Image (cartoon, helix red, strand yellow):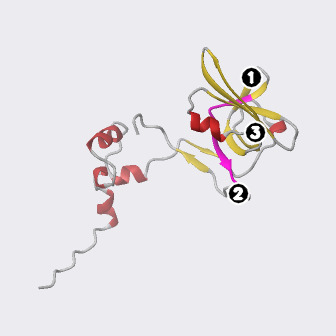
Amino acid sequence: MARAARPAPALADAGEAPLTRLPGVGPRVAEKLAGRGLLTLQDLWLQLPRQYEDRTRLTPVRALQAGVAAQVEGVVEAVDRGFRYRPMLRVALGDDSRATVVLRFFHFRATQVAQFAPGVRVRAYGTPRAGQHGLEIVHPSYRVLEDGEGALGDSLDPVYPAIEGI
């Protein structure tokens, strides 16, 4: 006996579905999302970004300005893993503009330290600030680039509000 095919739910009906229908969203995650007013799929679809990051272009290190978010690409010149009040990782990144910016991390793992070998190409995004020896970017988002890799994105990246525990 053949089963009758069920009609597909309308898109409007799908929007009213609870978030627990999504893979990986159980009762705990759903509760955290509900704390932000996100109860249905439609609520999630209509969640707007709080800002956009422009990762479509590179800024030469020499042209960085304190307080202005930018994306830089360069070669790791030096790595210093030290301890001053708390563990700290500093990575000196230089580019063709013959300037250097320091990437500073307070929370890091040994595998992260191993990524930053001198001579490795890195692309980093963050907001520079004045440091002890010039500009530094604290906890930038970064990517270690392989040979031949390096295409820039062609659109702005949305940044959504963080939800604690997710």
Count of marks placed on residues: 3
Binning the other alpha carbons within 10 Å of mark 1 as few (below 14), some (14 to 19) or many (20 upward) gives some
- Look at discs 3 and 1 and give the one toward the viewer: 3
Mark 2 sits on what residue? 149
> Does residue 54 show up?
no
Residue 164 falls left or right of residue 25? right
- Spatial CA distance of label 3 from label 2 is 18 Å
Q: Is residue 140 magenta?
A: yes
Secondary structure state at the residue bearing disc 3: loop
Mark 1 sits on what residue? 131
- Spatial CA distance of label 3 from label 1 is 21 Å
> Does residue 79 show up?
yes
Lower position in the chain sequence, tag 3 or tag 2: 3
Span of residues in magenta:
136-147
Mark 3 sits on what residue? 118
Dividing the picture into quarters, in which one does residue 125 lie?
top right
- Look at discs 1 and 2 and give the one toward the viewer: 2
The spot of residue 64 in percent (x, y) is 79, 36
Q: Are marks 1 and 2 in contact (CB under 8 Å)?
A: no
Tell me the residue at 73%/44% (across/down): 120
Q: Between residues 69 and 137, which one lies in front from this camera angle?
A: 137
The spot of residue 121 in percent (x, y) is 74, 46
Q: Amino acid at mark 1?
A: Gly
Q: Is residue 97 magenta?
A: no
